[in-house]
Image (cartoon, grey):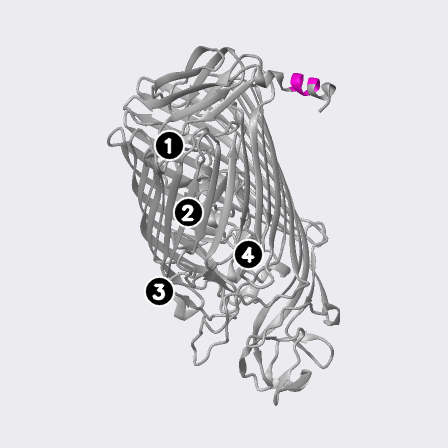
Amino acid sequence: MNRKTFTILFFLFLPYISFAQSIVSGKVLSSDDTSLPGASVLISNGAGQDKGTITDTEGNFSIDINEAGDYVFKLSFIGYNDYTKNITITEAQNLDLGTIVLVATDAVLQSIEVLGRKRQDYNSEYSFSATKLAMINKELPQSVSTVTKELISDRQAFQLVDAVKTVSNVAATGIYNHYNIRGITQADDGQVVNGLRTRQYYFLQPITSHLERVEVIKGPSSVTFSSADPGGTVNMVTKKPLKEKRGEISLSAGSFSTLRAAIDFTGPLNKEKTLLYRLNVAYQGAKSFRDLVNNNAFLITPSLSYVPNESTALNVEMIYNNSVGNLDRGQPIFGAINGEFDINSTPISLNVGAANDHYKNNELLFTTNFSKKFTDNFGFNAQYMKQTWAEDLAEHRVDGTAVDIEGTIIPTLARLRYDRRQQFWDTDNLSVYLNYDIETGNITNKILVGYDATRWERKIGAGFLRARRYLTTSGGQSNFNPDNASNFQTMLVDGVTMPVPAVPHFNLENPFNGARNTNAYNLAELSIPANLNTSSGIYLQNQFKIGKLSALINLRYEFFTDIFNYKQSEEELKTNAFVPRLGLTYEITNSISAYATYLEGFQPHTNTVSLSPTAEGFFWAASPARFDPLESSLKEVGFKGEFLNGRIFANLAFFDIIQKNILLGDTYDLDNLTTRGEQRSIGFEMDISGNVTPNFQLVASYGFNNAEIVEDAIEEFKGERIGGAPKHNANFWGRYDFTNNILRGVGIAIGAQFVDERYTWYNPTYSTDRVLLPAYTVLEAALYYQPSNTNMQLTLKVNNLLDETYWLGGLNPSRLGPGSPRNIMFTTNYKF
């Protein structure tokens, strides 16, 4: 090394070698001597050089400081007053601030969510979406189950279906983003993001890297979300900026060629900390235990918040999500033999797809939230969301069982169809409301008056290229009728004469998944009619409280318009609905409250065309808005409790749900359909979550429902269980971090999920076969290691620990949704 190079390096590293590091440490407790894990610690020198961390499971913290000087030390934790102290740091000093006790206070909640959640555990004590305004969960007369980002991270739940596993009375109906909640299977298209409805198909799973929490709002929440499923609504709440500078990098690798990477950066962009940012980026490249299935996704979500003072707040957020993979239609099984199906007749990995199939989704969301308080008790709030969504599909899928020339089923052959499909959707959401608070002594009224508007448009240009059924002698395609066998082309296979299929059969005994020459198919051109659906509602809400008794009253009037074949030969239909809610809450003690609620809901049949078996015929032909909308009601009573200074939250609920106006009749005989269908689900559920001790967190739930088909066009279904509804489900997840000297930094976690037997759920009148899927219990485990004096965590997660063969659910016998066999995931997280 020459002298010049040495001189450059000397001055380059002089700031680091001229000052030995100092360490600031301490311990944070509540007033009852309970440790506070996850409290924010920030040290600032006033020159924009901030260093921060969070307290560990025992409330301890330690920060390295590289420069001597005067600093401001600040502690903050949700539900407690901030603690601030001026400190002076000298060279090579170990400054122990000792035990710091934070004093509990009533948290002041945002009117709309523009700032991120500081708390870092399995509990979220408030919700915005159930009532528009922020409300403490124990005061809400409705069951809301929350899955926080901390629980998502500990369980390595990268996809939404894995995140909601811990919630009572929630069961996946298969391998898609689709659920049975409280015994009622979802029928509404799209997802709910930050309380606003989007529109897209449910086939590919949303990833969770950008989510602050997932809320399952139980019951028909039409007073908040307009069209809503009776069992409940899954609301994905995205991460918002924080005033403290934080960062996290995550890298994962595991089974099925899975590679994942994610970053999460947040903090202030100016010295005053009025302009804040958050950036989440995630990537997944993954295959599957299922043949030919890929799940590749890229997500980027920048977010900005401007909070110049306590009366004004603005958030702007964008979500870009690009998913590329295969549309997995599930495991087909042999046709029924003597009326019985054998779910083990084919391997769970079996997929009828071809190597040249694909499924691509491209989604862009723009959201802005604005809040302005004109006085201490009067404010204005507004939200707007714009979504564009496009899909590009090429797939082979099962179209039914194969038959011979006599019409006899050949159980080892699956009849296929081939589709190439493109669709384009634009969605707009607007929500504006005024809130006015009145306080007189111990009586309070929180009044809200608002207007919502949603616009869904399926754009002109959507369409199919399709081959299905059997080839006729005239060159067309048709369902095979053995009485007119001479009208169909025939072939001889292994001595059996059969009609020629439009797409070659899939041999379940000798599968072929190579590339298929789709140019040889006789493809028909089919256009998907453009649609415009608009929904607008005016509503009034009052949260009235006198002493320990509070009431939540909502009245909403909704206007819905459906224009079928938009901008062409339009068919316009309108419907209106009046939706009430009445809820009562009584604080039995400071920790326990009892509640009762009555809710009504509605769903225009237009919103259920993709998922309702009887409405599918309207996809091409007409608008189902000609019928009265689906109507539902909920009667619910329950208890909520917070224990150990808010570290443990428990909810017990008893419910009775009725859904009416379900379409009945021949799916494709639209003129003869009626709205006589009815379903009912009665049950109860319990959810518990939080820190039992500072180093032991858990989530446990149990749900029971008696979900019954009351009236149906299929006579033998009456009195039977609703498809997709398990009678019992139970979940447990617990993480324990060792605190002794030998195992300090090591943590373990154990999880279990039990789901009772349930039927497949998609049964239009032309396909009445149901398969009863067996109950299952699946175990999972994780090992964590946090090296000392670092902000790094290493995680080894094993799913399906005992390698059970099980089925999440299924649509019908040709589309079962098997669960994954044993698989592992290794993840490295670094926080700074």
**Which residue is the site of mark 2?**
782
Residue neighbourhood size for the residue with mark 4, other residues' Cα within 10 Å, grouped as few (<14), some (14–19), many (≥20): some
Q: Mark 2: which secondary structure?
A: strand
Alpha-carbon distance for marks 2 and 3?
A: 42 Å
Residue neighbourhood size for the residue with mark 3, other residues' Cα within 10 Å, grouped as few (<14), some (14–19), many (≥20): some
**Proximity of marks 1 and 3: CB atoms separated by less than 8 Å:** no
Front label number (4 vs 3): 4
Alpha-carbon distance for marks 1 and 2?
A: 17 Å
Q: Which mark is residue 57?
A: 1
Residue neighbourhood size for the residue with mark 1, other residues' Cα within 10 Å, grouped as few (<14), some (14–19), many (≥20): many
N-terminal of the two: label 1 or label 2? Answer: 1
**Proximity of marks 2 and 3: CB atoms separated by less than 8 Å:** no
Q: Which mark is residue 256?
A: 4
* Tag 3: amino acid: Gly
N-terminal of the two: label 2 or label 3? Answer: 3
The image shows residue 255, relative to residue 94, as above or below, that is below
Front label number (1 vs 3): 1
**Which residue is the site of mark 3?**
719
Residue sitting farthest toward the right = 519
Residue 19 placement, left or right of 134: right
- Magenta-drawn stretch contains 478: no
Tell me where the magenta segment starts and ends, as one range.
7-12
Quadrant of the frame with the N terminus: top right
* Tag 2: amino acid: Ala
Residue neighbourhood size for the residue with mark 2, other residues' Cα within 10 Å, grouped as few (<14), some (14–19), many (≥20): many
Q: Mark 4: which secondary structure?
A: loop
Query: What is the quadrant of residue 215 in the picture?
Result: top left
